[in-house]
Image: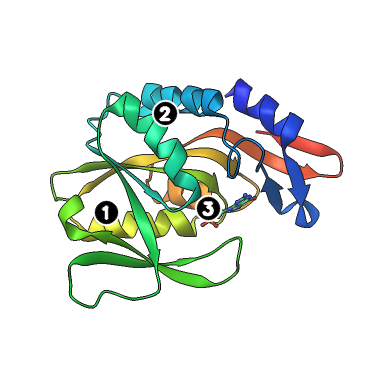
Amino acid sequence: MKLLEERIRRDGKIREGGRVLKVDSFLNHQMDIGLYNEMGKEFFRLFGADGVTKLLTIEASGIGIACVAGQYFNVPVIFAKKSKTTNIDGSVYTAQVESFTHGTSYDIMVERAFLQPGDRVLLIDDFLANGAALRGLAAIVKEAGATLVGAGICIEKAFQPGGDTLRKEGVRVESLARIKAMGEAGIEFC
Ligand code: 5GP
């Protein structure tokens, strides 16, 4: 998506020797709602014909974009909560996720009442790196007996393995901007 690529080039900041991209000024801290709206529209163009009944994301950075996309899909938006407590009473689905940004792992959970076997679920997230966040969400969809339609990602760092591994496993991953490489010379898109 040209608009997102141009914005990343203009305002993105490369950190940790080209491993991390900061997009705090328009995506994950201050949010450019005009841009969010265009991304939501694009996710709907890509997945709108697939009978999606729920959007599922993970707190916190995915929530904004999932809500804007949800207005196009006109379906409920669920965000998996990051939780310190595990599934004690069986009323929640849980999965473990290794945090890319913090290097630790944490549990995520979704109330069982919000995902049913008949649901067709589209995952939404801001970034795709090693794929741990998507894998955790996909595990919850599977546990619920629902159908995984695919994943809509704003920025995929294609030099990290998550996207390709998930695609090889048969998950339909659509990323609006795919970064091939980034470093002192700038950012190269796929
Ligand atoms: P993964 O689980 O695919 O390794 O990483 C995805 C999650 O880590 C995203 O939900 C995102 O919050 C965070 N993340 C991964 N890479 C980056 C990055 O380069 N910049 C920012 N801001 N977040 C990232």
Q: Which residue is mark 2?
A: 43
Of residues 18 and 169, the one nearer the viewer is 18
Please tell me how crowded label 3 is: few (under 14), some (14-19), or many (20+) other residues with Cα within 10 Å.
Answer: some
Question: For the point 26% across and 29% down, which residue is it?
Answer: 50
Q: Amino acid at mark 1?
A: Val
Residue 78: percent from left, percent from top: 30, 47
Q: Amino acid at mark 3?
A: Gly
Tell whether 43 sits left or right of 98.
Answer: left
Q: Amino acid at mark 2?
A: Phe
How far, Cα to Cα, is label 1 from label 3?
18 Å
73 vs 63: above or below: above
Name the image quarter holding the N terminus: top right
User: Disc 1 or disc 3, which is closer to the eye?
Assistant: 1
Query: Which of the 4 image quarters holds residue 53?
Result: top left
Tell whether 112 sits left or right of 106.
Answer: left
Residue 169: percent from left, percent from top: 40, 51
Name the image quarter holding the C terminus: top right
1 or 3: tag closer to the N-terminus:
1
Query: Which of the 4 image quarters holds residue 77?
Result: top left
Q: Is mark 1 within 8 Å of ligand 1?
A: no
Q: Which residue is mark 1?
A: 141
3 or 2: tag closer to the N-terminus:
2
Question: For the point 27% across and 24% down, which residue is it?
Answer: 49
Q: Residue furthest right?
A: 184
Q: Residue furthest front?
A: 30
37 vs 115: above or below: above
Query: Which of the 4 image quarters holds residue 142?
Result: bottom left
